[in-house]
Amino acid sequence: MSEEKTVKEIKEINIALLGLGTVGMGVYKLVQRRKNELPRKIGCCVKVKKILVRNAYKIRDGVDNDLITDSWDEILSDDSIDIVVEVMGGLEPAGTYIRQALEAGKNVVTANKDLIAEQGHELLVMAEEKHCDLLYEASVGGGIPVLRPLKQCLTGNNIDMVLGIVNGTTNYILTRMTEDGMEFDEALAKATDLGYAEADPTSDIEGYDAGRKLAIMASIAFNSVVTFKDVHTEGITRITSTDIRYADAMDCVIKLLAVGKQEEGQVSANVYPMLVPKNHPLASVNDSFNAVFVHGDAVDDAMFYGRGAGELPTASAVMGDVIDISRNLLQNCTGRVGSTCYRNLPIKPLGEVKNCYFFRLQVEDMPGTLASISSVFSKHNVSIKQVIQKPAKKHGSELVVVTDFVKENDFAKTLDELRTMEMVYEISSVIRVYA
């Protein structure tokens, strides 16, 4: 890519697509759909010049076969290609391709949350050194603009919290459990039938997908590197319809939340199910929709809401990045915004994080049971906010306890001791409460 291009000389921006799956096809469609408008919007044409696929001989309806190639070197060596759009996913070979593209002076757009969550800082530093753009809006929140506002529009703030529902599969499952009274397995099966859940849904239902997205958001919001390994993740597989009913009785809903906070010179980044009060804006985010809630010292509260996945919503975010880079190319100012992680804040250990808890116990129905259990709470500095006692279905009683804020370590010790007590038959569920 020649550095001698001027605004007048650039008539066309050429892009190469790496991958032609759901998102890649969406990007291709959007480029074709907007080809007559883009010259007016950005000052030049945008054209897909090459598409890298595994099988170059497969017929793809609606795609010019002359664009198809299975040779990465053909794209890398083409100086006329200005932007490489990586929508393959996975760490490799995507990581190698992006590094080589940046080394060759090509700008990059990626939707690869796995790669950015683990190696994003390193890649951004490399892009900055090469005076190239590396943009990745589509890696979080599908079509919702989240990362650019965090990195640019809100950069005048000191952001101390980023809180989100960032996985559509789990949100759909919890919505069906809440609205239709389904158990987890039934709701997962329905999500699979509708295409919301993959054949192997582990990454979604165990919170890994949300954890990767939180690492990306937290790094930008708190200006300090957070990688996926820094994020504690828990999924929704243990949530039951009974928990959902109790939450409703407490005027709450259960959501899988990605919770990032900057406090006391540390960053905490955790993903887990939480009871969310119905009056909180995130409580009304249902089905496959995503939302991210941000708190800054200047803006106060802000929320971003929309489609979190899908062919065209995700392609919309990719196209936004392509257009942003195209404008930078026209003005010879690529590489304006690189890594914004100028701090080196430590990750707060999970045990030091404070949360409120909701949990259910099956206990012996005898005088003194509640007093004995309460003494364990007191011993470990756990303050009880609410206790509900009901007859159990089989024998004994069911205790539902809601705590005040408590350190995770202290609460874990409480649970460990409760499990050793003969009067405690079972700890049926443990869910944090957003407060």
Image (cartoon, rainbow, N blue to C red):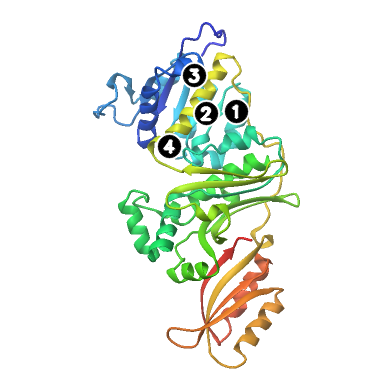
- Count of all numbered marks drawn on residues in the image: 4
Q: Are marks 1 and 4 in contact (CB under 8 Å)?
A: no
Split into 4 quadrants, where in the image is the C terminus? bottom right
- The residue mark sitting in front, 2 or 4, is 4
- The label on residue 41 is 3
Q: Dot 1 corresponds to which residue? A: 126
Identify which amino acid the numbered label 4 is placed on: Pro
Taking depth in this image into account, of 222 and 289 the one nearest to the observer is: 289
Q: Residue at x 54, y 24 (%)?
A: 324
- The residue mark sitting in front, 3 or 2, is 3
Q: Dot 2 corresponds to which residue? A: 99
Q: Are marks 3 and 1 in contact (CB under 8 Å)?
A: no
Q: Are marks 3 and 2 in contact (CB under 8 Å)?
A: no
Q: Give the mark nearest the N terminus, 1 or 2.
A: 2
Q: Give the mark nearest the N terminus, 2 or 4.
A: 2
Q: Residue at x 59, y 75 (%)?
A: 401
Q: Dot 4 corresponds to which residue? A: 313
Label 4 to label 3, Cα distance in Å? Answer: 20 Å
Badge 4 element: helix
Q: Give the mark nearest the N terminus, 4 or 3.
A: 3
Q: Give the mark nearest the N terminus, 3 or 1.
A: 3
Identify which amino acid the numbered label 3 is placed on: Lys
Q: Residues within 10 Å of mark 2 (few under 14, many from 20)?
A: some
Question: Does residue 157 lie above or below 82 as drawn?
Answer: below
Badge 3 element: helix
